[in-house]
Amino acid sequence: MRESILINKSLVAAQGDYCALLSIFSSDHLRFNDVCYATLMSRLGRLRGRNAAAAKRDERYRTLVALLPAVVQKGGVRQVANIAHALAKLGERREGGAVLDVVEARADWLANTGSPQNISNTAWAFATLNKDAPALFRAIDSRAEWLADQRNPQSIADTAWAFAKLNIDAPNLFPAIASRADWFLNQSTPRAIANTAWAFAKLDKPAPSLFSAIDARADWVVNEGSPRTISNTAWAFAKLKQGAPNLLAAIESRADRLANRGNSQDISNIAWAFATHGVDAPAFFSAIDARADGFVKASKPQEIANTAWAFAKLRRDGPKLFSEIDARADWFAKEGKPQEVASTAWAFATLNKDAPALLSAIESRADWFASESKPQEIANTAWAFATLGRDAPALVLAVDSRADWFLNESSPQNVANTAWAFAELGTDAPNFWSCLERRREAFAAQASPQNICNTAWALAIAGRAGTNSELLRVLWAKAISAGEGELSNENLNQLVQVGLHAKGDVRLQSPPKALVQMMLDAASSQSNASSDFEGRVARRLAELGVEYTREYPAFGAKLSGLLSVDFAVQPSDVAKTAIECDGPSHYLRGSSGQGKGRENGRTTAKRRLLERRGWRVINVPWYEEWEELKQRLENALNNRDR
């Protein structure tokens, strides 16, 4: 006994000298008891960086770890807990697993005889090493009331954290903590509070009284807590959708300090929390944008994606942030998961910020993206391409080749958004439409009126009204049967366009008279504002002596606001000529951003519709040189009667 006490004192004296510690073990381990082993492991567990790595490479250390299962099998509860805790601090996943197996076999003994700190240290070790221990955690939870009554807030917090880290339910522990909220918060540190709140949120356990009490102490938590403590607390409130007015106000008032001291994970978690709550934080988001270069370079893809999403959700401009993200697009698209890539593309599009490098990187990895993504991620990304006017032929082709899977797994919203994007991009997706036609009844039964109208419009704009007539009939019938107030003005305008494009291809059911009037009212409420570009073309036409009518109602006066011809040359003649001024918004930009790009789906559809009505259409692109345009106009107008 006296020998082991002397050995233990020498181990304590060796402190952080791993060579001295392992030398003592090598020479005296035959005289070690469980206390000596626990002391030695605790001292080794305090090593950091190179010292820890060097110790773990030492053959004497490997010999030590190999002896630990036998030590733990017979050791005292405090010693067992300390050895497990040290193994976790050393990251000893492989050999440490054998030791923890022995601890798990003694679960009831440990939970019934250990102190709160012994229990929490052991639970923390299992969680840190990601080692499942159903018997141990079941035994701990059975002792929840006793554990909470011991009034050791740090042990309670660490134990709750361990349950959450391993995603193990604790039906007794969490109610025991919540029922003692005031005592727990009065005695805890901000870190213990943050870990406990995180655990409640991770296991999706609402506790309104506990979280309200935390929010009441928000100034203290934010003043005394580290950025990680603050971010974990904010994340927990947002995850549980628990209001946090005081916490968020306290964070916003200390925005610069948090942005300066917090790492990228802390900052992205806090940004995500603000956005999830729908609470604007101009100072905090401005502080992020001011430090965008360092933030993006230091961040993981998930942190970038969450932060970009938060800016977009709150409609917060972040010029530096989004510029830095696009500058690192190739790395981001390679390293990011599909969900992170899709979320970031959505954020750019929501804020109407062009992302040439990011979208080009996605387009170049279209097959990978389409095969690895979930339907919502595909829909959001297609929507982003279409919203930003970026061509995506490879992406459309990749999704179209997986149309059957996509439509089987998608929600009606995802289907409608993807259909809308394909139509806007003007890229045909025959498999997509054929597969949807086979599912037409099921889709129509589940989709909202908005989804129905978007999909019907997309089908018509894509020029597939005749090819997929059965699908269009079902969509149309469902749309015109919508109840009062279910269709927005945009939906009504979509139905007008569907009717025009379908004429001659498919016979559609007549809408109720009241709905027809609503459609006409919606169309007539639209207005066409002339652009500077149209003014320049008007002057050129005058120079050529061309007689024309501006904003001619080619589809009737009541639809003039929705669909009119920019310049109609002698519209009463049999050979009607329409001159359409196509500015940049009529064209898709290539994924690389180079070249003029091709026209988008709306522009193609309008020309097709006019031509079916007997018009000759001359499209005037915004980038065409005047001499070239002049020659083209003269040739077209001189030959229009031939």
Image (spheres, rainbow, N blue to C red):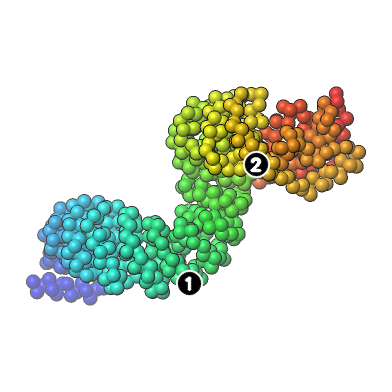
- Quote the CA–CA distance across marks 2 and 1: 48 Å
Of the residues shown, which amino acid type is indicated by label 2? Ala
Amino acid on which disc 1 is placed? Arg
Q: Is residue 86 visible?
A: no
Left or right, 112 with respect to 509, comes to left
Q: Given this view, does label 2 or label 1 mark the residue nearer the observer?
A: 2
Q: Quadrant of residue 200?
A: bottom left
Residue corresponding to mark 1: 254
The front one of 240 and 27 is 240
Quadrant of the snapshot with the N terminus: bottom left
**Vertical relation: 229 (above or below) 463:** below
Tag 2 secondary structure: helix
Please name the residue shown 14% across and 75% down the image.
6
Give the vertical position of 350 relative to 298 (above or below): above
Question: Which of the numbered marks, if any, corresponds to residue 337?
Answer: none
Along the viewing direction, whichever of 513 and 531 lies nearer the viewer: 513
Horizontal and vertical percent position of residue 544: 90, 39
Determine which residue is flagged by label 2: 522
